[in-house]
Image: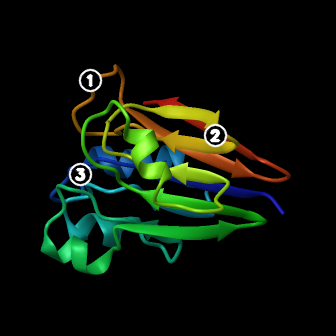
Amino acid sequence: MKIKIGVLSDTHLHNVTDELQRIKARYFSDVDYILHAGDIVSLEITEYLDDGNFFGVHGNMDPYGVRELLPEKRVLKFGPFRFGLIHGWGAKAGLEDRISHEFKDVDAIVYGHSHSPANHVKDGILFFNPGTAIGYSSSGPHTVGVLEIDKDIKGTIIDI
């Protein structure tokens, strides 16, 4: 069974914008799940993204309401694969090393915080950061991510 997951992070939005609506309609209309790796900033965004298939974590910029609703990290199972979902913290340098210590026995770690996309395997684990679809981007264009699961996990970063 194939599973398709849309991935966002670091949206930093206080309300649903036309741009977020376009992103959801264009890139996530056919996904089975949506993941958000933190710095959502508003409960309105979680409500908008949640069609019964939403999983998120809070980030360092999220207010109390988002922190109450969403955990700091979580492990999710899609098909035979285990995914760690976390925002991250601290400097961009060493971020993947820091977050990797937060999970045991996962096949992939989906994270945010750096606003820079990543899609690579390290020590047998897929590290996947969708970058930022709307927020400040120091690494170029705004991006979202898509994970496709079948016999393995394939990550794609999409420039928007």
- Tell me: 38 left or right of 13: right
Give the residue pinned by disc 1.
138
The residue closer to the viewer here, 2 or 100, is 100
Give the residue pinned by disc 3.
17
The residue type indicated by label 3 comes to Thr
Give the residue pinned by disc 2.
155
The residue depicted at 59 percent of the width and 62 percent of the height is 104
The residue type indicated by label 1 comes to Ser
The residue depicted at 42 percent of the width and 33 percent of the height is 143
Query: Residue 37: image x %, image y %?
Result: 39, 55
- Tell me: 24 left or right of 71: right
Q: Are marks 1 and 2 in contact (CB under 8 Å)?
A: no
Query: Residue 93: image x %, image y %?
Result: 34, 30
User: Quick one: quadrant of the C terminus?
Assistant: top left
Camera-nearest label, 3 or 1: 1
Q: Are marks 2 and 3 in contact (CB under 8 Å)?
A: no
The residue closer to the viewer here, 98 or 152, is 98
Secondary structure at badge 3 equals: loop
Query: Residue 152: image x %, image y %?
Result: 80, 48
On screen, 150 above or below 43?
Answer: above
The residue depicted at 47 percent of the width and 69 percent of the height is 74
- The 10 Å Cα crowd at callout 1, few under 14, some 14 to 19, many 20 or more, is few
Count every numbered label the image shows and give the total: 3
Secondary structure at badge 2 equals: strand
